[in-house]
Amino acid sequence: MAEPIRIIVDKCVGCGLCIKVCAYDAVSLVDKMAVLNERCTVCGACVSACKYDAIVIERRPFKGQDVESYSGICIFAENRHGALSSVVYEIIGAARELKVSLDKKISAILLGEKVREMADELISYGVDEVWMMEDSAIGDFNEEIQADLVAKILLDKKPEIFLGGGTIIGRSLLPRVAARILTGLTADCTELSIDGDNKLLKQTRPAFGGNIMATILCDSHRPQMATVRHKVMKAAEPLEGPHEGQILELSYPVLKPRVEVLEFVPEEMDTVNLADADFIVSGGRGLKDPKNFSLIEGLAKAIGGAVGASRAAVDAGWIPYSHQVGQTGKTVNPTIYVACGISGAIQHLAGMKSSDIIVAINNDPSAPIFNVAHYGIVGSLFDVVPEMAKQIKG
Amino acid sequence: MKIVVCIKQVPDTTNVRINPETNTLMREGVESIINPFDMYALEEGIRLKEKHGGTVIVLSMGPPQVESALRDALSLGVDEAILLSDRAFAGADTLATAYTLARGIKKVGKVDVILMGRQAIDGDTGQVGPGVAENLGLPHVTEIRMIEGIEDDGTIIVERLLEDGYVRLKSKLPIVLTVVKEINEPRLPSLKGKMAAKKAEIPSWNHEDIEFDLQRIGLTGSPTQVMKIFTPPKPSGGKIFEGDVQQAVTSLLAELREAGIPIGQQREEGSRNG
């Protein structure tokens, strides 16, 4: 097998930039020339870093599809408990922007037991064609069944782009679809655009806990698939005036379910869930005691937000894991994130760095959380948090 | 019962620091570790074995140095380790990785439960688990926070975390499950485990050991390609308030309102005179 990555000897100047960016210790300098060793995973970080175009990844052409026969932008209209998931409006917003560059129609795949009203709603938001299948056998939480149907619809209808939510369901369903129809899928994108030259979908996403960004292309397979991170892209508003849209009722055989839902148990908190929250107040080690989470809850209630926590607070058993924000917890993107008594370890930042506005409250002015905070108060959270709740409540 | 746990070796981001000058990752000298989420999968696999009997096999795809991660897994009490390593696998995206792992699992034979972490902390995609399930024609459930039990008739009951609660599910085995941190607390390696891990033979399978469609592995089998990698822009310095708490909070809220955030705005009117 030929090496997929190589260094062009004539171009390498031995500057060592590639060594600095390699996370796998796979590059070294031998006689002032970069040399790759067997630790290399062909991740491409060095290719992007090299200023001299001296490192190349050579992709051999492989059995492509008839790319030209695919057209249009399709979205997955995730729905649960009888309503469209909030991420759907954000995907429609993204699709409407892509439509401006591509000039192709927007379609939506809508599956479920009773979804007819949602089809009309999708059209009012600018979807041109709803590919709908109503069947009581399609469960809310069965990605195996849904992936099978989505794959069949995509193969029949051939959209060039297929977008789903970066939700728990979306990130479980779309990989299954991609593996079925053998196409590329980019997870959790924060930016989508169309390349001016080749009209390919440019998919930008964070990796390494948000410390680097990567722009991904899928050139020879269709559809180009991506999940979209929740609450990053602006939700679409309904179109002004009537919009001509079509509802196509589809019918396919539904697989026999192998996974059966016994019960759904909603989160027992009187505050909103983290994924959907516009305001989040989080507490960390600085709270010192589990009962002090009442301060966090008090402020969260005052601003109508959800309660988050750092890993330290969760590991100490002060609050359930479902509240954990960060690399091993949830990734959130609220309008305001208030971090109280959280030092700001890189793993915590990975989960909240893309919030619109970050407010840090910490008594240590050198805490790393202040490096990413848009606003901060240096002071004891035991004074600041209740004062904030008091002033907000008026 | 036969349990396969798929793990990934990743750079230890807990030791990664950001260079404040350039806002880039300082990755030099970063150790490689088992992906933290996979540690929970390993623990759950070992617990299932302890409860129901059988074997736990750990499987990983990667360059030869991944062997050290497999030895770490063996030291925890895993029975066997298999490395899928070949330059032909290099550069695999999630589609090619899922295919390669699935072919490896197929060679292992009849498996009841396949476990992995919800995502790896370097790529953060979470796409390989569902992909492996599809390749093997098995059901899958992501975000497992608890395995309630496995019945004698070969059904498993699990709890899956969702954004707004959790759902209890029942499935037939075999199944692919991806786990979250809440599921357990991973054990530390025992001395005996470490000794055994040191001596263990770890077979390495390449593209000739398993039947592969060579069009579907490595870079060739990867539809996605990285166009560019860049560092997100450094956040501009924030506005920090110090001193009198009441004044600091008042100033902060005023700033937020000025930035167009409707925080406590509706109360503002009423409190103006009070």
Image: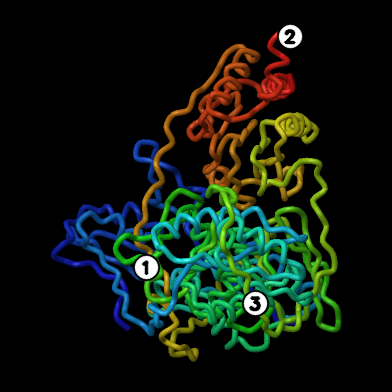
Say whether residue A367 is left or right of residue B235. right
Type of residue at label 1? Answer: Val
Specify the quadrant that holds the C terminus of chain A: top right
Q: Which residue is mark 2?
A: B274
Residue at 57 percent across and 53 percent down: it is A90
Which class describes the residues within 10 Å of circle 2: few (<14), some (14-19), or many (20+)? few
* Horizontal arrangement in the rendering, residue A380 relative to residue B67 (left or right): right
* Residue B245 in view of the camera: yes
Residue B172: % across, % down: 78, 80
Give above or below for A304 relative to A148.
above
Amino acid type at mark 3? Val
Relative image position of residue A303 (x, y in whole percent): 70, 31
Q: Residues within 10 Å of mark 1 (few under 14, many from 20)?
A: many
The part of the image, by quadrant, that contains residue A249 is bottom right
Q: Measuring from the top left, give residue B134's x and y in whole percent.
A: 61, 79
**Residue at 52% across, 64% down:** A106
Classify residue B105 by image quadrant. bottom right
Is mark 3 in CB contact (under 8 Å) with mark 2?
no
User: Alpha carbon of mark 3 to alpha carbon of mark 1: how far?
Assistant: 26 Å
Taking A309 as reference, is A218 above or below it? below
Q: Give the camera-side residue of A325 and B268.
A: B268
User: Type of residue at label 2?
Assistant: Gly
The answer to which of A279 and B149 lies nearer the viewer is A279
Q: Which chain's residue wears label 1? A: A
Q: What is the x, y in percent for residue B238? A: 48, 28
Which residue occupies the extreme left position in the image?
Answer: A10
